[in-house]
Amino acid sequence: MGFGDVAGIGALKEALTITNRNLELVLAELQETNRTRLESVTEELRRVNTQLAALVASAERTGAAV
């Protein structure tokens, strides 16, 4: 007797299929959220790095300690 012969296995297989599809959707959403957040953090770090470089350059021109 295979699993297909067990009473109620069809409903269980359907529930697992739905669960797997929902997990795929959640994973896709998390990946998009993480990608968007990573891009945001990257942009902010670049902005801060540019400001810091300008500050260091200005301090070097004026002889101030950084």
Image (cartoon, grey):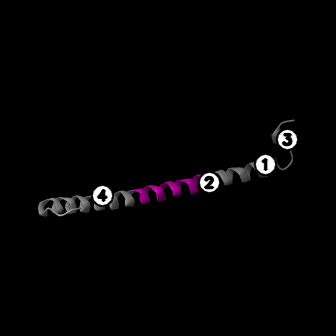
Name the residue that disc number 3 marks.
Answer: 5
Distance from Cα at disc 2 to Cα at disc 3: 27 Å
Task: Indicate which disc, 4 or 3, sits on the residue closer to the N terminus.
Answer: 3
Name the residue that disc number 2 marks.
Answer: 23
Residue drawn 34% across the image and 62% down it? 44
Which residue is outermost to the left? Answer: 61
Mark 2 neighbour density, 10 Å: few (under 14) some (14–19) many (20 or more): few
Secondary element under disc 4, as helix, strand or loop, is helix
Which quadrant is the C terminus positioned in?
Answer: bottom left
Depth order, front residue of 44/35: 44
Q: Which residues are magenta?
A: 23-38
Marks 3 and 1: CB-CB under 8 Å? Answer: no
Residue drawn 25% across the image and 63% down it? 51
Q: Is residue 46 magenta?
A: no
Disc nearest the viewer among 4 and 3: 4
Distance from Cα at disc 3 to Cα at disc 1: 9 Å
Marks 4 and 2: CB-CB under 8 Å? Answer: no
